[in-house]
Image (spheres, grey):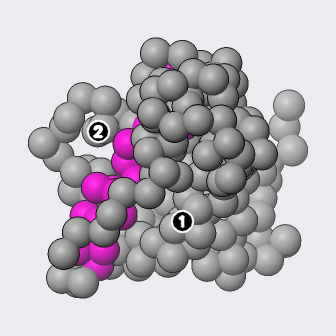
Amino acid sequence: MTKPTTARTCIVEAFLQLCQTLPCDKITVSQLTKKAGYNRSTFYAYFNNTDDLLKQLENELFQLVDTFLPHGLRIFRTGMPTAEERLLSQRFFKSNARILAMLLGQNGDPRFVHKMKNHIRKVLIQNLQLTTQQITPQLQLLIEFIINGHLQVLVYCYEHDSPLSPLDFWLKLRSFIDQPALLAAMTAKSDKSP
């Protein structure tokens, strides 16, 4: 049995549709309610304003990242996703790729991009159990590169309807990486040269 569509879901869907053509910070409550087919009071039953809608979407995505990232790290380390992890990955991307692509893409919210990167960085550092002393400038740069790359692969796969899923791309990429050398580079002492 399918779950009935709620007014909230319709409003969020209208927001995502409008994000395809308008910057998300330019979308008004009036545009949203007209597109969703609801009145303003229905919108305000769920959200204080469009920033609140965006913040609620962000929080939902952050919770999903918290759930998915430990599995993603294990998959990247081993290169061998379990059947359950492959299914989890497919569900995660199928359910969230569109929202992430909209918020991270051309009409997305630069504040969200910054918050998402910081959130992923924090979760990544916690899951890798890195200490402050281990986080060298090289490691910070590498983490930034990895986060940006992964987020943009997700956006690209969605926008171009890629036959290669982000998980399959990352598994192929992993096979090209010399992991011992990468780990050594991540933990190398910072060079002080200008």
Residue that appears at 84% across and 71% down = 132
The picture places residue 62, in percent across and down from the top left corner, at 61, 62
Identify the residue position indicated by label 2 in the image: 157
Compared with 22, 102 (above or below) is below
Chain part drawn in magenta: 85-107
- Asked if marks 1 and 2 touch (Cβ < 8 Å), the reply is no
The picture places residue 108, in percent across and down from the top left corner, at 57, 29
- Amino acid of disc 1: Val
Asked whether residue 36 is drawn in magenta, I would say: no
Which quadrant, please, contains the N terminus?
A: bottom left
Residue that appears at 68% across and 53% down = 45
The picture places residue 70, in percent across and down from the top left corner, at 50, 77
Looking at the rendering, which quadrant does residue 71 occupy?
A: bottom left
- Amino acid of disc 2: Cys
Work out whether mark 1 precedes mark 2 in sequence or the reverse, and give the earlier one: 1
User: Which is more toward the observer, 130 or 48?
Assistant: 48
Looking at the rendering, which quadrant does residue 160 occupy?
A: top left
* Res 15 seen here: yes
Residue that appears at 38% across and 42% down = 98
Identify the residue position indicated by label 1 in the image: 65
Compared with 98, 139 (above or below) is below
Compared with 159, 79 (above or below) is below
The picture places residue 133, in percent across and down from the top left corner, at 84, 71
* Res 143 seen here: no
Asked whether residue 87 is drawn in magenta, I would say: yes
Badge 2 density bin: few <14, some 14–19, many ≥20, Cα 10 Å = some
Q: Classify residue 16 as left or right of residue 194.
A: left
**Rendered image: mark on residue 48:** none
